[in-house]
Image (cartoon, rainbow, N blue to C red):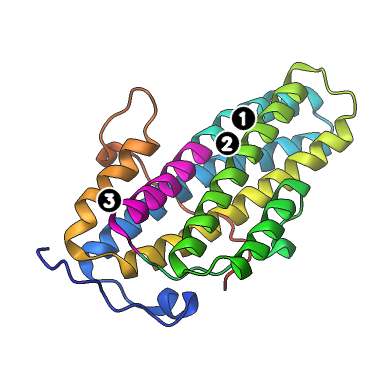
């Protein structure tokens, strides 16, 4: 853990994805991904239940369940934004230069994601340094997650309390927001892996602490108490 030399990176994001991480880095990666997947599966399964109840003609239970999904979405978004902020903060402070591929607008269904992904794709051709490209992608993902979280929770809450003017359209919007947040999750995991490949071993502890500080709710237990759940579904990753 005293080795401060920059590790050798892969030539591309795809190379980074195939690289086997050292044990210390692998533990950080596997734990963080497991916690993210835990939050995702709770949210995704509850949304599936709400949709299924609506399809089988139980609107009351469906609206009650979709109201619950708002909290699960917030939990995932907070953890995801926390990871992205930790990545950005560490890269700015320590000068970490990971590989990064631009976002693909075609991997998003809603206007929020597509618009931001198009801008990131454009900026990738303007920004000269790899470090700038990485930081811009991370900040773009953070912005998309925050916007989608706000949009999803507002829509779910409006449906739950019965103030939706166009319920069919709003259910459709929930599905789009869910898909695009899942895309952001997959992108963040790929970015995270490339970051760890480029991270010196002696900075792992500092970085791991930054993740926890940015991801924790106002009152929380240490990371070791967070439970794990199985992952349910995986969307295409734009950078793959």
Label disc, if present, on residue 78 of the rendered structure? none
> Residue, x 50% and y 54% (percent of image)?
138
| Quadrant where the image shows the N terminus | bottom left
Residue 108 counted in the magenta span:
no
Q: Is residue 118 visible?
A: yes
Q: Nearer the viewer, mark 3 or mark 1?
A: 3
Indicate which disc, 3 or 2, sits on the residue closer to the N terminus: 2
Q: State the residue position of label 3.
A: 207
Q: Secondary structure at mark 2?
A: helix
74 is higher (above) or lower (below) than 210: above
- Labels 2 and 1 touching (C-beta < 8 A): yes
User: Marks 3 and 1, how far apart in space?
Assistant: 29 Å
Residue placed most toward the observer, 162 or 5: 5
Query: In the drawing, does residue 67 fall left or right of residue 57?
Result: left
Residue placed most toward the observer, 10 or 237: 10
Q: State the residue position of label 1.
A: 70
Residue placed most toward the observer, 235 or 110: 110
Q: Secondary structure at mark 1?
A: helix
Residue 122 % position (x, y): 68, 64
Q: Nearer the viewer, mark 3 or mark 2?
A: 3
User: Marks 3 and 2, how far apart in space?
Assistant: 25 Å
Quadrant of res 27: bottom left
- The magenta segment: 76-96
Residue 15 % position (x, y): 44, 81
Q: State the residue position of label 2.
A: 73
Residue 212 % position (x, y): 32, 40
113 is higher (above) or lower (below) than 217: below
> Residue, x 72% and y 61% (percent of image)?
105
Residue 84 counted in the magenta span:
yes
Mark 3, Cα crowd under 10 Å, few <14 / some 14-19 / many 20+, is: many
């Amino acid at each position: 853990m005293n080795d401060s030399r920059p590790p050798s990176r892969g030539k591309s994001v795809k190379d980074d994805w195939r690289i086997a991480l050292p044990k210390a880095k692998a533990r950080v990666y596997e734990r963080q991904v497991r916690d993210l997947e835990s939050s995702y599966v709770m949210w995704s399964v509850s949304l599936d239940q709400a949709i299924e109840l609506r399809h089988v003609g139980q609107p009351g239970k469906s609206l009650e369940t979709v109201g619950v999904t708002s909290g699960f979405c917030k939990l995932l978004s907070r953890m995801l934004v926390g990871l992205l902020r930790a990545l950005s903060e560490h890269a700015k402070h320590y000068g970490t230069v990971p590989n990064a591929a631009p976002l693909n607008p075609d991997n998003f269904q809603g206007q929020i994601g597509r618009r931001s992904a198009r801008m990131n794709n454009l900026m990738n051709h303007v920004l000269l340094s790899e470090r700038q490209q990485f930081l811009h992608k991370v900040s773009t993902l953070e912005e998309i997650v925050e916007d989608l979280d706000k949009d999803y929770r507002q829509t779910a809450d409006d449906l739950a309390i019965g103030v939706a003017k166009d319920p069919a359209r709003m259910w459709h919007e929930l599905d789009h927001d869910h898909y695009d947040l899942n895309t952001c999750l997959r992108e963040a995991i790929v970015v995270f892996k490339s970051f760890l490949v480029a991270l010196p071993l002696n900075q792992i502890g500092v970085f791991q602490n930054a993740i926890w500080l940015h991801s924790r709710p106002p009152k929380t237990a240490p990371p070791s108490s967070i439970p794990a759940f199985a992952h349910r579904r995986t969307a295409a990753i734009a950078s793959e």
